[in-house]
Image: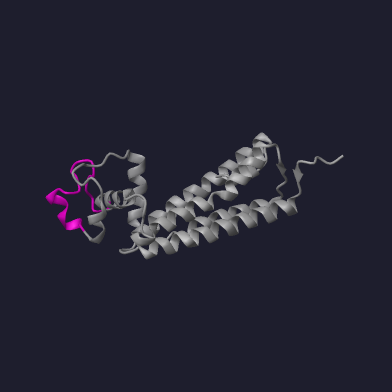
Amino acid sequence: MPDDKSVRPAVTLGLVLASAAWLLACLIGVRRAWQAGDAMMGSGVAFQLIAGAPMLAWAAALWGGRQFEFGRREVVALVIAAGACRLVLIDLAPAQSDDLYRYIWEGRVQAAGRNPYRLPPEAAEFSDLRDADWASVNHKEYSAIYPPLAQAVFLACAAVSPEGGRVIVFKLFFTLCDLAVLALLLAWLARLGRSPGWAVLW
């Protein structure tokens, strides 16, 4: 007798694609609100809140014991959908945190052969490194606080970033890290014998 809480792979695929379409539509709304400036930021926040509706539905179903069956096709669709939802905002300037500009600055300081731990961004010794992004660097009065491994990441990203394209390169790196977490989560769920549906929440 079939389990009445089991969802066939074909239906799971449709739900993944429908959730992705909903999220993408909301994120396009967020994108347009951010591009329109401060006057539209309220709309951007509203779109972000609305975007969470499918995740609430997935969470309720999973906690309720619903068993979503995933085949290779459904997992591939989930990964592609996750990538698309992250890439839709990749080229926009950071809007909710300015930390990225600090990462870029510290990477550039290292690429120039200098030590970001020794002096703060406002130091006169770093004046030759200041560019259009420097105005967005936060806490210019403090030297670097991020640990060495993070600094190595900043240096690597800065080393391959073209001038004017640093934000995208850094955001792309962190997007790839985010998708790597998704891959690890899928592998972990498989090892535990749990449904990949839990990864949808990520």
Query: What percent of the width, then of the height, locates residue 153?
Result: 37, 47
In terms of image quadrants, where is residue 166? bottom left
The quadrant of the rendering that contains the C terminus is top right
Q: Residue furthest right?
A: 1
Question: Which residue is depicted at the point 23% across and 41% down?
Answer: 117
Q: Residue at x 27, y 48 (%)?
A: 106
The picture places residue 140, in percent across and down from the top left corner, at 20, 47
Is residue 84 in view? Answer: no
Foreground pick, 196 / 29 = 29
Q: Residue at x 38, y 54 (%)?
A: 170
Left or right? Give the position of 153 relative to 20: left
- The stretch of residues the image draws in magenta is 111-130
In-front residue for pair 199/169: 199
Q: Is residue 20 magenta?
A: no
Q: Looking at the figure, which quarter contains the N terminus? A: top right
Majority secondary structure of magenta residues: loop
Of the pair 148 and 120, the residue shown nearer to us: 120
Q: Residue furthest top?
A: 192
In this rendering, does residue 152 appear at all?
Answer: yes
In-image side of 194 versus 166 (left or right): right
The residue depicted at 23 percent of the width and 50 percent of the height is: 113
Q: Is residue 121 magenta?
A: yes
The relative height of residue 4 versus residue 77 in the rendered view (above or below) is: above
Q: Nearer the viewer, residue 100 or 23?
A: 23
Task: Give the total number of marks visible in the rendering.
Answer: 0
